[in-house]
Amino acid sequence: MDNIAGTKSTLTWVTNISVVILVALWVFPTLGLFVSSFRTTDQISTSGWWKSLFPSEQTVTLRTAAPDTQVQDGPLFVIEGALLEDGQDATIRSWGISSRAVDAFVPGEVAELRKGGTISVMANGRYRMEHSAAFTGSRGQRVFLGTTVAPEFTLNNYRNILFDPDNIEGMSQAFFSTLTVTIPATIIPILVAAFAAYALAWMEFPGRALLVAAIVALLVVPLQLALIPLLKLHLGIGIGKGYLGVWMAHTGFSLPLAIYLLRNYMVGLPRDIIENARVDGATEYQIFTRIILPLSFPALASFAIFQFLWTWNDLLVAKVFLVDATGETTVMTQKLVELLGTRGGNWEILATSAFVSIAVPLAVFFTLQRYLVRGLLAGSVK
Amino acid sequence: MKTSILSGAAALAVMSGPVLAEDLTVFGPWLGPDQLNVEAVLEGFEAATGHTVSYVGSDSFEQQIRIDAEAGSAPNIAIFPQPGLAAELAKGGFLTPLADGTGDWISENYAAGQSWVDLGTFAGPDGAKDLFGFFYKVDVKSLVWYLPENFEDAGYEVPTTMEELKALTDQIVADGETPWCIGLGSGGATGWPATDWVEDLMLRTQSPADYDAWVSNGLKFNDPKVVAAIEEFGAFARNEDYVAGGAGAVATTDFRDSPKGMFDAPPQCYMHRQASFIPSFFPEGTIVGEDADFFYFPAYADKDLGTPVLGAGTVWAITKENQAAHDLIAYFQDPASHEIWMARQGFLTPHKGVDASKFSDPTLRKMNEILLGATTFRFDASDLMPGGVGAGAFWTGMVDYAGGKPAQQVADEIQASWDALK
């Protein structure tokens, strides 16, 4: 950047501002998702996640104990109890018994019940219902409380997804089968693409430019186009649905991008090193393994991150080529979708599973990040 | 009668012991709690016959069954939520006709039996009609949900005719409240709740024959009768005072969130018209029948159309033939197979031979009574129309209509898209 020294400060500003905007664009939804993953369905549907961080004023609908808990106190039938659970951090501002007037009374006042009798609610949530005749019906009286509630979070969503006894076995099985899909589906394309990229970058043969153009052209073909023909081919040659099929599909779909990326990187390596090696009598294979591969490590690693993330998060390819009707094979994404239920809409599960499935890719990213830097250094120090 | 005895005997023979145990793969749209329910039924089948069954569910069933059928990796049994899709696969030659005598059994043992046979009969690849689909598990759609205690607080009565329902709607507005919660949002399927409204109102304003003609496009979509039904829906959904959040919020509110307005304090709305499955989206801990209840979406008293009921159901078809697949269809002729799911949740059945006391809660029994007491039962029209209309133009058209487009223009556009498919 030294050659544009005069514009440096403005450019830095522009860079800094765009970085801040980009980071905010990413962090806000992620933070929202993260907060939502600790909230219940009802909380999510009634208020935004940004409100959950502060005490909120809300009207809650609660119910007294049922009439079968009433006791006789002299001439009166009495039902007593607490509306708020012990230890619940809430202050009662107002209360009511009709949905038409939910804040009709302040704590301590006495209200007439429609079916006869009275009810009073105290500021601590204790209530007392009195009637000269026995209370009837199967359910308690509905009471609306206007309360100020402290922020409340729950770990239940994570418990449901990870440790629910109904699906804990299925979940861990899905975790390992996702690894079984993802690891080979990351390694195979890198291996193949590295060889191809070297050949396309440094070996002279007729039609090389055309081949590169063809690969670039393949980048624009949507993979959905190939799903049915490819599955037919797999079934026809006897692979069927299974791990081999899904590895091959992932490999095929990712090769154009992998070759294109790696070739562009390898073309940029210094010509002198490679020609020196040729003069010294190294074979093409030796040049590839001893010189090109170590120097291309950053590109290999960054493509590995790409490919790993995409196969880890993939649902479509796995569904078409792996998940068959026997239900023996499954992947994490499929398992998480199953938790959503037939008609979806369980936001708390969506939010939580996003964080469950993000955990491994994050770990991979940070591990490879270290190698990325080391790879860069290894190239320069020698 | 004779055939029914024979098929009954065949079912008994199946029950009495496995001739040859086979693997059976079943693929359907149910996930989560519904998946546990269907697996319980399939376990009952395993216990009765000795076959081994595995069930896989998918939220993109409609797309995936196509891929699997085309590629030749289909499961033995597929559970279609829409008969229209099953009909398309039958036409492509991917379905196997059910065993002889199944049709006779259905028409004798299901309420409104012949209509279930007709709904499961599709044209094969050679154009010959055959029974391909067996209905098991149905939904009733003509329901209005409400909170009894809110009605009590305000002194409202449950309406028994459409006139009373409209009077109640106006009454609630006059009291300064909002009567309805309507939400059409549903991701890629946004608009479908409105198609149910229109179908229900079609059944309440026109004869069943007209409804059938509409489904087959004998009665054009832009016919004044259909446009009138769309405008009936508009009378509810496009009236600013009638809908929570105003008419503009109808198309953008998610159908899963929309009933929650009834449970707010103070309530945002008092009524919600939706099918029998909706309680799964009520707030946690809601007890149906006590906290929330439903009434039959009433018919006009001054139109002599009886008590029509709109419904939907899942149709089971054989996508890869083996003996176990036929045995499963035979197993569904045994009332016990229906009673397993009845004892769980969200299951209604047109089977006349089941023991109604097996229902897990009284509300399901009440719904099943609505189903069995229908003078006219009609299947969800949008599920029967060609996919491009019933799961396409009709949905988007309704969203446009809720957004303010004139009914006639919307109907013309839907008819045009139907013509384009022919």
Image (cartoon, grey):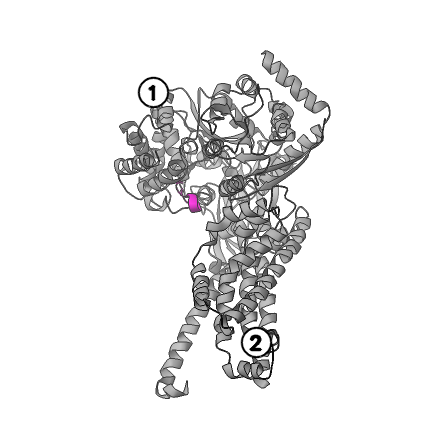
Magenta highlight range: B181-191
Residue B318 position within the rendered picture, expressed as x and y whole percent measured from the top left: 57, 31
**Label 1 marks which chain's residue?**
B
Is residue B354 visible in the rendered image? The answer is: yes
Q: Decide whether residue B83 is among the magenta residues.
A: no
Is residue A354 visible in the rendered image? The answer is: no
Q: Decide whether residue B187 is among the magenta residues.
A: yes
**Label 2 marks which chain's residue?**
A
Residue at 53% x, 26% y: name it.
B368
Q: Amino acid at mark 2?
A: Ile
Q: CA distance from mark 1 to mark 2?
A: 84 Å
Residue B159 position within the rendered picture, expressed as x and y whole percent measured from the top left: 41, 27
In the displayed structure image, the side of residue B144 where residue A156 appears, left or right: right
Residue B334 position within the rendered picture, expressed as x and y whole percent measured from the top left: 63, 23
Check disc 1 and report the residue beneath it: B303
Q: Amino acid at mark 1?
A: Lys
Q: Is residue A343 above or below residue B103?
A: below
Q: Quadrant of the N terminus of chain A?
A: bottom left
In the displayed structure image, the side of residue B404 where residue B347 appears, left or right: right
Check disc 2 and report the residue beneath it: A292
